[in-house]
């Protein structure tokens, strides 16, 4: 396959950046999208030029590092997968592919296609921990949990923090990410004691990081590689309002 790539190149967060054109030649159809970029980078290096910088790690759809906008869509038009799981057979010979970084104020560009998503780490840190014994393994049946609750918590816990939800949202909202991270703990009895403090801390940290508000357009749910439900956002809103009400009464 021979392709034309329109790639965003930017030296750092202060550089204006621009799209540059590259010819991707003799790309195997069985190659993944990141393997295609590896091949192009080898061609660029052979010409003595600076290769395209992009994030990656596991290349198995687990870590969420491969955050790219492909033809204007986070992780590409294929649903339920990350960029590293996209294969070149999904494209046609002669196609032009536009490749850009996730764009959000809270995700400053480091270089080219690499963005700083440490704001997500700080939101998780603001959520704190859960109070459980860690000295020994507890009995499996010591804390009864219904299958419905367990399934909902596990579904929320599948969030890999890639940031696609933020990149797709016109407001650059992180509500789907925050609600998933809060929901998987808040629904379980082990997370109940810190539930209110967790919700307030994570939402306030999200606002401090500069993410926008949710206006229920559901682009986040549509592009999420792990199909996290926007129902979690409704749960987060309810938990946050209740926690703030209790906080104002107690103070």
Image (cartoon, grey):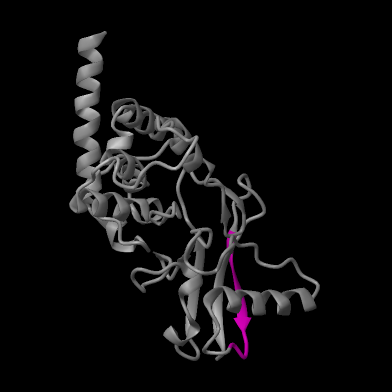
Q: Nearer the viewer, residue 144 or 179?
A: 144
Asked if residue 240 lies in the magenta stretch, the reply is no
> At 34% across and 28% down in the image, what residue appears?
194
Q: Residue furthest top?
A: 251
Q: Is residue 27 above or below residue 71?
A: below
The percent coordinates of residue 46 (x first, y second) are 79, 78
231 vs 163, nearest the viewer: 231
Q: Is residue 19 magenta?
A: yes
Q: Could you say where residue 82 lies in the image, as x and y percent from the top left?
A: 44, 67
| Residue 216, visible in the rendered structure | no
Residue 163 seen? yes
Q: In the image, what residue occupies the spot 33% across and 70% down?
A: 79
Q: Start and end of the magenta stretch?
A: 18-27
Number of numbered labels in the structure image: 0
Instruction: Write down the quadrant of residue 48 in the picture.
Output: bottom right
Tell me if residue 242 comes above or below residue 37 in the rendering. above
Q: Which secondary structure is most common in the magenta stretch? A: strand
Q: Quadrant of residue 77?
A: bottom left
Give the quarter of the figure containing the C terminus.
Answer: top left
* Residue 75 to residue 182: above or below: below
Side of 13 relative to 49 (left or right):
left
Q: Does 75 appear above or below 3?
A: above
Q: Examine the image and state in which quarter residue 54 appears.
A: bottom right
Query: Could you say where residue 123 lies in the image, as x and y percent from the top left?
Result: 44, 36
User: Residue at (26%, 50%) from the top-left corner?
Assistant: 150
Question: Percent from the top left, x then y, of residue 49?
Answer: 76, 70
- Residue visible at 32% across and 45% down in the picture: 184
Check the picture and name the quadrant holding the N terminus: bottom right
């Amino acid at each position: 396959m021979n392709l034309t790539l329109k790639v965003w190149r930017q030296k750092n967060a202060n550089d204006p950046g621009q799209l540059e054109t590259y010819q991707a030649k003799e790309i195997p159809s069985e190659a993944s999208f990141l393997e295609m970029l590896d091949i192009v980078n080898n061609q660029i290096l052979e010409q003595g030029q600076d290769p395209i910088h992009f994030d990656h790690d596991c290349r198995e759809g687990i870590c969420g590092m491969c955050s790219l906008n492909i033809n204007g869509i986070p992780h590409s038009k294929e649903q339920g997968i990350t960029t590293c799981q996209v294969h070149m057979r999904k494209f046609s010979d002669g196609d032009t592919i536009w490749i850009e970084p996730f764009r959000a104020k809270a995700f400053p560009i480091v270089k080219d296609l690499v963005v700083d998503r440490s704001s997500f780490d700080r939101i998780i840190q603001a959520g704190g921990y859960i109070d459980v014994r860690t000295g020994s393994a507890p009995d499996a049946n010591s804390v009864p949990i219904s299958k419905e609750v367990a399934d909902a918590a596990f579904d929320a816990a599948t969030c890999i923090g890639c940031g696609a939800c933020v990149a797709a949202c016109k407001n650059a909202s992180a509500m789907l990410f925050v609600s998933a991270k809060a929901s998987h703990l808040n629904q379980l009895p082990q997370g109940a004691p810190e539930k209110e403090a967790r919700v307030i801390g994570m939402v306030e940290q999200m606002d401090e990081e500069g993410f926008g508000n949710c206006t229920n357009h559901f682009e986040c749910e549509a592009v999420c590689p792990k199909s996290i439900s926007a129902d979690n956002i409704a749960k987060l809103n309810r938990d946050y309002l209740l926690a703030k009400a209790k906080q104002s009464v107690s103070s």
